[in-house]
Amino acid sequence: MSQGKQQQHQQKVKPQTGISPTRAEDYPEWYQQVVRAADMAENSPVRGCMIIKPWGYALWENMQRVLDRMFKVTGHKNAYFPLFIPKSFLEREAKHVEGFAKECAIVTHHRLIAGPDGGLVVDPTAELDEPLVVRPTSETIIGEAFAGWVKSYRDLPLLINQWANVVRWELRTRLFLRTTEFLWQEGHTAHATEAEAVEETLKMLDVYADFSENTMAVPVLKGRKTEAERFPGAVETYSIEAMMQDRKALQAGTSHFLGQNFAHACGIKFQSKEEQEEFAWTTSWGVSTRLVGALIMTHADDDGMVLPPKLAPTHVVILPIFRDDETRAKVLPFVEKLAAELRAQRYGGREVEVEIDGRDLRGGEKNWGWVKKGVPLRVEVGPRDVEAGTVIYGRRDEPVKDKHSVTAVEFAEQVVSLLAGIQETLFARALKHREDHSRRIDSWDELLAYFTPTNSSSPEAHGGFAWVHWAGDPAAEEQLKEHKLTVRCIPMEHDGETGTCIVTGKPSPQRVVIAKAY
Amino acid sequence: MSQGKQQQHQQKVKPQTGISPTRAEDYPEWYQQVVRAADMAENSPVRGCMIIKPWGYALWENMQRVLDRMFKVTGHKNAYFPLFIPKSFLEREAKHVEGFAKECAIVTHHRLIAGPDGGLVVDPTAELDEPLVVRPTSETIIGEAFAGWVKSYRDLPLLINQWANVVRWELRTRLFLRTTEFLWQEGHTAHATEAEAVEETLKMLDVYADFSENTMAVPVLKGRKTEAERFPGAVETYSIEAMMQDRKALQAGTSHFLGQNFAHACGIKFQSKEEQEEFAWTTSWGVSTRLVGALIMTHADDDGMVLPPKLAPTHVVILPIFRDDETRAKVLPFVEKLAAELRAQRYGGREVEVEIDGRDLRGGEKNWGWVKKGVPLRVEVGPRDVEAGTVIYGRRDEPVKDKHSVTAVEFAEQVVSLLAGIQETLFARALKHREDHSRRIDSWDELLAYFTPTNSSSPEAHGGFAWVHWAGDPAAEEQLKEHKLTVRCIPMEHDGETGTCIVTGKPSPQRVVIAKAY
């Protein structure tokens, strides 16, 4: 947004908010401004690729740390496979796969030489015999390796995870949500039986849901994808679906049961206990830096980012207030002692992370900076507080102007429960938002009405989650798409209520969830 | 190595070793066999790219964890920048840089389409306007970002690190030591003054040396590179140099003082305290998965990998020995109790990592498997040990047949000091090796003789580190290259002894280190 446009927004918004425009005014632009104000990421000079700045990257590192532990506890080991995939590998896959994604970065040459004008040109004599594709996902290259590693049923299950960058040539990109290059983890496993592979697929879906709800404080629905929304090559795709504050759905993680498709394509065979040669059953599952986008769109408010304490790079920021060297000498030792007391405690498997912001800036400017970054607890300490042994603190899940005064001793005693309380509040708030915007719908007209904005000032509010009887007919799904709607998932948990499809009138075994989606 | 060749080796070697050939027989092949036997990595179907298998990757993760903490303690923050660098960015750099590396992976297209024969072809209509290079290093793309981030002296120093994959199109590759794609970290910093940037460059060299000696147990020399060996674009390049067991040098990490070269190329300018516009001073520094190769070539022996405990993914492997269900029921609870007692302790900032290997394999096969993987302590427990309350253990820094018998209580009490002892032994052994193969040399003939194999059965032993007076003449350095020798570094620490260059006879302020190198 231009400087002028921003000022214009700030003038017309009352009361003044940390972020302009507000969510209600312009949700997509609000999102960009939150990312910018929290200094999490920016666009790079390379089309569609982002630069993840330290605050955004620290969030991703915290996500990685928690997820990595969950993967290891469930028996997975990390490994690393090549960035490049030979074209012939994708051809093998493409034979099996109708909807093969062909937009990708292709390496065709391996040398730059000096050009006639002093610049550099691609050396035409250095063309590769076979083009290499920068991995959009690694099923084929990992499958090829698995084929070499698996000989006998004793080698199974093979439970591997990779943390990596991947590239998909996207036309329209948005920071974190959809970028040409992104960071992710991809789990790849091979099993001796179908039942074990299905169990693994669902286990990792549970891990993702657990992570999303208990670490990110983002409630999710676990469900199965329709055939149209399935990963090409998968027998079944499962996902976790979250509702953003504009009521659109965001697919936050996927887990694929690949049957024997990739085992056939890559030759992953093993000798069974019965000494028969059999093809393995494989799975793959992944989450990406897109989760950072989900976090922002679930918790951030009109004042900026709001971080769930379990992921916050800094739990508590202390803002010492002093006018001169004398008050400084009074305040600094006090806040350093407080910081040490806080750091001696643990929350969510980490030391309580404390930052003392002693920068020479106006107090209001500093305070707002940390509000926009979403730090859970802000603590102010001035000379009079030191005399009284008190601190004034603000919680990021409460309005910025709300302040609490307690003794420093009390604050240190309460800090872990305060953080736990904020984590709970954020989850409860997001859950209520989803429940407030979920509805059982039993007719096509009602469905369309639900997704038609009634209030022209809020063109970005998209109905919510419509729980609808639907019989699984692909033609009916096409009809949804005309209205920018999709079946987000066939939920794993349902109440057993049967009904009739609102499009075809055919019998429906359960309600599915229909929404607009990112 | 072919099966036949391997058998041939095994037949002629006495006593039998875990790895064949031995170091003395064929050092390069020994290296490959250690990597294979420890299951650390393998070649991939993509030319020059390796697959890092779980055991090798766990080593890298442990290196990352320790280094990352050291970077953060010294004030650096992690961020992530694009994989791709526009060709024009490299042109900017190339103008400043004579020896610009042009062998790289170049992305020219962004779409694959169905070809005439059912395969996939590169879509000729999807050519990029500007080719993108897969980053060989990120000075230019990070410099461009820094130019946007730095406005005032208040924004400095900017201390950033990135963990990433990079690609350099290498002709001859060897697992870990030189691969087309590798994993590394690259630090990039910008400073207001030359003195601060130089200080940063040397501080990070110290961090690398500290990590190498105290975590990897690999002794290193810190030194400055000659002009010929400098990173193109750097004002000074510093490195840590380690001696491998074949007496060749391996550059294990580099730290570059870049002066204002990249600040000029990328436009990193700031307003000084005196309100003058000035160019920043920058540094960059990196270590890579090459360190895994250095670890192998420093510590591994003729029985396989030998891991310094501070980096070992598993510190202690327990091998329960039982014949039947009855002895099994006796042994397993005993080893599980022991494992719990070990895991309750910490070594090198981690829980003591214990694996109980209950696989249904012959004891000798299991034991040798863990020897080859380099686990520091192997513990055997059979039914009679359970009765006596004892265990039998072997240390990986001692011959495989050497065993110690102690009570389980004693072993649990001693485990941390045993690990510390192994860590110390490995460092002392490597240091002694370097000292045994370092020599002051004062004539050209003596230098050549030092690097001429005297024993035809050991063609791979390469003299060692020659400490030689040398006056810094590039022509003299060329003469060294004819004998496959290079000035590895101009050491930071020296005794003040001056002399005359052994090539030119000119006055020399200090001895430099000359060696063959990886």
Image (tube, coloured by chain):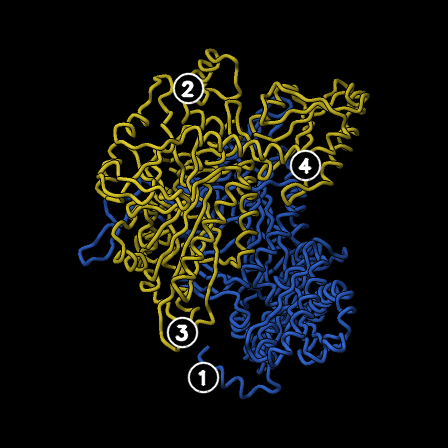
Chain colours: A yellow, B blue
Label 4 sits on residue: A416
The span from disc 2 to disc 4 (Cα, nearest Å) is 36 Å
Residue shown at the point (66%, 38%) measured from the top left: A353
Chain containing mark 1:
B
Image quarter for residue A194? Answer: bottom left
Ranked by sequence position, the earlier of labels 3 and 2 is: 2
Label 3 sits on residue: A272
The answer as to whether the residues below labels 2 and 4 share one chain is yes
Quadrant placement of the C terminus of chain B: bottom right
| Label 4: which secondary element | helix
The answer as to whether the residues below labels 3 and 2 share one chain is yes
Label 1 sits on residue: B4
Above or below, A386 relative to B44: above
Q: Left of B441 or right of it: where is A400?
A: left
Q: Residues within 10 Å of mark 3 (few under 14, many from 20)?
A: some
- Say which amino acid is labelled 2: Glu
- Say which amino acid is labelled 4: Val
Chain containing mark 4:
A
The span from disc 3 to disc 2 (Cα, nearest Å) is 62 Å
Query: Residue A25 shows which numbered tag?
Result: 2
Q: Residue furthest left?
A: B116
The span from disc 2 to disc 1 (Cα, nearest Å) is 74 Å
Q: How crowded is mark 2: few (under 14 residues within 10 Å), some or many (20 or more)?
A: some
